[in-house]
Image (cartoon, rainbow, N blue to C red):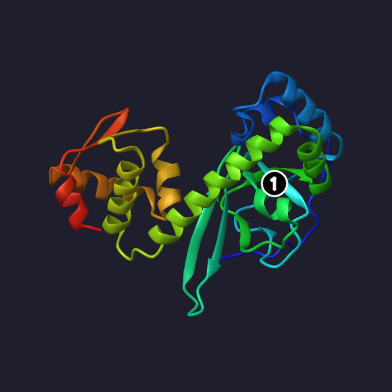
Amino acid sequence: MIKSQQKRKMVVANMLTIDLLKRTDLSQSLSPECLDAVYSIFAKKSFSRTFEPGEILIRKGDPFNYLLIVESGLIKSFDYTTRGELIFFYYFSQYHIAGLVSCTLGSNASSDYVANQKTTITYIPRESYLSACRLLPEFQGAVLKRVCKNAERQIEISILSRCKYAKDRLCLWLFHQYTNTRAISIPIEFTIESLSNYLGLTRTCLSKELHTLEAEGVISLSRKEIQIKDLETLKKYI
């Protein structure tokens, strides 16, 4: 259930730290010099807010005037079909940034953004973000790469979300990993919680389906990877 914000949130100014910025997915490829320059622009007017589970950060159609850096917690972005069916578009976990496309284009939010658990967000004004893009070509290039990656994932998620059954959704995700890399071994670079959030499944449901596929000989599981053992059977589930 989405809760309305009944009381004004405490705003803490200048809360962006260099350590937080360094940990974001957008900063991974930046040189130390560029990272310092981005930080000097971003930090000046940054502030943070903490949201309780179910509280709305931004509604569909509202102006997206800030980049949202997830300092802690988890937010989800979702929309509804014309028939009222809920579509889970994207989850943003710790150190991820929401609003890149909207802030770049100056467009309104295309979906609702809600705290999935207690979440602290650091806000970067759109003006600061655009200033960094204009002044720092290296940062601009990193933004372009990230936006392209996000677009690819958005297409994948929209397809996955239309799979009614959990097993079909998991198998389609596994097959996407194979088609993207042509490797039958998929490194586990995520927690079971983050993957279950990505697929829109509960942790218990995902664990059950993974072990079912393992028992059927379709995959094998280890602490570091998922290995596809029977690609043809996997294809039959999608």
Q: Secondary structure at mark 1?
A: strand
Residue 64 versus residue 67 in the image, above or below: below
Q: Where is residue 123 shown, x and y percent of the image?
A: 76, 44
Answer few, some or many: residues within 10 Å of disc 1's Cα (few below 14, many 20 plus, some between 14 and 19).
many
Q: Position of residue 229 (x, y in %)?
A: 17, 39
- Which quadrant, please, contains the N terminus? bottom right
Q: Name which residue lies at 13% across and 46% down.
A: 216
Left or right of residue 108, residue 195 in this image: left
Quadrant of the rendered structure where residue 144 is?
top right
* Residue closer to the observer: 48 or 185: 185
Q: Residue furthest top?
A: 32
Q: In the image, what residue occupies the spot 76% across and 50% down?
A: 66
Tell me the quarter of the image containing the C terminus. Answer: bottom left
Most distant residue in the bottom direction: 83
Decide if residue 47 is in sight here.
Answer: no
Along the line of sight, the residue nearer the viewer: 2 or 198: 198
**Total labels drawn:** 1
Query: From the viewer's perspective, is 40 left or right of 155?
Result: right
- Front residue of this view, candidates 50 and 200: 200
The residue drawn where x is 81% and y is 34% is 135
**Residue 27 picture location, percent across and down:** 64, 31
Q: Nearer the viewer, residue 99 or 136?
A: 136
Indicate the position of residue 43 as horizontal and vertical percent values: 81, 33
Circle 1 residue: 68
Q: Is residue 190 above or below residue 30?
A: below
Asked whether the viewer can see residue 60, the reply is yes
x 63%, y 35%: residue: 26
Q: Amino acid at mark 1?
A: Leu
